[in-house]
């Protein structure tokens, strides 16, 4: 097996987040010589983890300039580490930070990059990457001869590496002059804790469709009650909220809207493809462009008034033909 | 006083999301069955980038928007009939593949070459737009590599908003993990932005805009230069459709209370 560099960035507290530990699992599974490259404000704690995992070399670019996720500094740090490591294969977790910066680093090194890898195997002594095409509609296995070959690994595909950090680690610091940048990261905008509806680690994905905002059997729209029921279900089940395109789009079309539902929640062809153990769809027809976003949701149930909806055609495990308002009202009582 | 912007949007065409797709093996590698017959649309993320570009250009008089699009000429012509109705832009067409199995490195080379050749483009004022994903390959790397080729090192991905300030600097919201946004300020162009979905609705069709656009689109298609986006070192071992078809249990006669009890028990299972 060719030499591998695992590139990870540390968090603000110097630790490695779950995506980095998952990528460590994948890198170790490839076999061969492993170098770990660390980028961040502080890297010592992460270096001890890399040492415990058996990294042959540990390279680091650290300092205040490399604390903030920013293209110019991140690409420069990754480029410097990759040059120093000289590895044929460069693995990294598909975090927002690396997804932004590593394609540029790959270009500078004359390499190639593949993103959204969901699997990695050794084939004839070289890696073979599994990834999806056309928004999770077809799966392909591919290999490349160009080196360095950067591969960004999707989060949630393997078990994170677990183990006690080593007592010490031999760290090779690489001096990188932070490139001039016109960009300053000024902060992070996040919903208030009690308004947070996206929970990537939640066991359940609760998906709301446009039916919640349509006229109900009494001929009226019950948007207030829909809000309360959906938020109640999220609280009771500690679920993450997804939405269909038609529902999130209604915000811009002057229709009745759920104020907490944004494009960030959208699941499907033009939205996200989240990974959750379970998914419960409500008031959503289960059309193909939406359901491709459920590719990585293992157990699927749906509540829908239409017994012939898309979910019923082999896309869900169970379809309950019922009024979602009545079902979720009762569900919330049970989960309270 | 606002400074005119030069905005280049990169975006290709993809099969209409409602179409059933099936992979086949062609002499050039994997392809889609009846690919040339499938109805196509401008990629949804590229569309958002185009609408954001037009919105920005409208707010800054004197600004200009180009759409650089690579795809088979005949398909580009079809799609542009619709896209042209939406917002004003000038098309730069590249006659090449729009396949999801193309390579982002080679695609970036073709895009950068076409952008370099745009007459009168002032790269010091350039905002390079595109989608951070696509409904074909979803490479998430083409914009970065195109920008690198153009010497642009202020880059942002998963962008939902850009707000240009009076002094010409701009604030950008980028999607990051956990449903959050990273906020950055860039003092001036050039910069590259890979767009998420943003907050703008799809513009309504405007026949007048369509007629104005089409006058330039047909000559642009005639001028389209051929380009390849393949990498001889890239090999596909397999391409297949997922085979999982679930045995769906359809419950028509349960009361809401019974359903809720069953769902609650299911949620509580490990």
Image: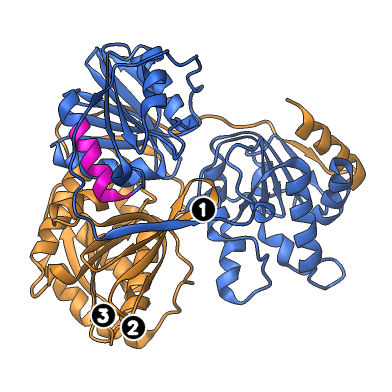
Chain colours: A blue, B orange
Q: Residues within 10 Å of mark 3 (few under 14, many from 20)?
A: many
* Foreground: disc 3 or disc 1: 1
- Residue A90 spot, x, y in % from top left: 26, 28
What segment carries the magenta color? A70-81
For residue A182, side relative to residue A273 (left or right)? left
Badge number at residue A67? none
Give whichever of B186, B152 is nearer the camera.
B186
Mark closest to the chain's N terminus, 3 or 1: 1
- For disc 1, the marked residue is B180
Tell me the SS state at disc 2: helix
Mark 3 to mark 2 CA distance (whole Å): 16 Å
Residue B27 position by quadrant: top left
Q: Secondary structure at mark 3?
A: helix
- Let me know if residue A292 appears in the view: yes
Residue plotted at (48% across, 23% down): A158
- Tag 3 residue: B213
């Amino acid at each position: 097996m060719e030499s591998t560099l695992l590139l990870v960035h540390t968090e603000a507290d110097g630790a490695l987040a779950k995506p980095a530990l998952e990528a460590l699992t994948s890198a170790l599974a490839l076999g061969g010589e492993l170098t770990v490259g660390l980028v961040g404000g502080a890297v010592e704690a992460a270096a001890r983890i890399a040492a415990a995992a058996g990294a042959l070399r540990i390279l680091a670019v650290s300092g205040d300039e490399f604390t903030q996720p920013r293209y110019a500094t991140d690409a420069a740090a990754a480029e410097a580490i990759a040059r120093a490591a000289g590895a044929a294969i460069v693995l990294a977790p598909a975090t927002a930070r690396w997804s932004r910066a590593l394609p540029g680093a790959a270009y500078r090194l004359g390499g190639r990059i593949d993103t959204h890898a969901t699997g990695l195997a050794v084939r004839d002594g070289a890696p073979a990457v599994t990834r999806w095409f056309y928004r999770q509609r077809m799966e392909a296995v591919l290999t490349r001869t160009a080196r360095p070959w950067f591969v960004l690994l999707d989060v949630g595909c393997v078990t994170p590496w677990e183990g006690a950090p080593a007592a010490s680690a031999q760290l090779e610091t690489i001096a990188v002059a932070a490139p001039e940048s016109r960009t300053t990261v000024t902060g992070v905008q996040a919903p208030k804790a009690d308004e947070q509806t996206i929970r990537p680690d939640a066991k359940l994905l609760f998906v709301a469709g446009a039916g919640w905002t349509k006229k109900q059997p009494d001929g009226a729209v019950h948007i207030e009650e829909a809000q309360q029921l959906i938020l109640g279900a999220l609280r009771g089940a500690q679920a993450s909220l997804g939405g269909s395109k038609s529902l999130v789009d209604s915000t811009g079309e002057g229709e009745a809207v759920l104020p907490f539902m944004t494009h960030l929640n959208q699941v499907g062809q033009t939205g996200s493809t989240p990974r959750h153990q379970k998914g419960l769809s409500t008031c959503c027809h289960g059309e193909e462009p939406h359901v491709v976003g459920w590719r990585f949701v293992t157990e699927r149930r749906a509540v829908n008034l239409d017994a012939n909806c898309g979910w019923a055609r082999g896309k869900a495990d169970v379809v309950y033909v019922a009024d979602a308002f009545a079902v979720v009202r009762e569900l919330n009582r049970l989960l309270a | 006083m606002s400074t005119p912007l030069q905005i280049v949007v990169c975006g290709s065409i993809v099969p209409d999301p409602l179409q059933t797709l099936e992979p086949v093996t062609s002499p050039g590698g994997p392809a889609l069955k009846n690919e040339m017959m499938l109805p196509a649309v401008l990629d949804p993320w590229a569309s958002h980038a185009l609408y954001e570009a037009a919105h920005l250009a409208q707010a800054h008089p004197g600004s200009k928007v180009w759409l650089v699009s690579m795809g088979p000429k005949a398909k580009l012509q079809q799609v542009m009939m619709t896209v042209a109705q939406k917002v004003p832009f000038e098309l730069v067409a590249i006659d090449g593949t729009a396949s999801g199995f193309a390579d982002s490195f080679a695609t970036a080379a073709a895009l950068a070459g076409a952008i370099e050749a745009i007459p009168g483009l002032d790269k010091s004022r350039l905002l390079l737009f595109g989608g951070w994903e696509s409904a074909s390959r979803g490479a998430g790397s083409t914009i970065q590599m195109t920008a690198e080729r153009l010497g642009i090192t202020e880059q942002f991905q998963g962008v939902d908003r850009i707000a240009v300030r009076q002094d010409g600097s701009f604030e950008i919201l980028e999607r990051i993990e956990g449903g959050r946004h990273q906020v950055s300020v860039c003092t001036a162009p050039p910069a590259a932005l890979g767009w998420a979905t943003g907050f703008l609705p799809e513009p309504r069709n405007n026949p007048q805009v369509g007629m104005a656009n089409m006058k330039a689109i047909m000559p642009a298609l005639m001028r389209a230069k051929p380009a390849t986006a393949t990498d001889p070192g890239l090999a596909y071992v397999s391409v297949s459709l997922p085979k999982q078809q679930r045995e769906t249990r359809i419950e028509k006669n349960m009361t809401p209370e019974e359903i809720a009890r069953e769902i609650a028990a299911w949620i509580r299972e490990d």
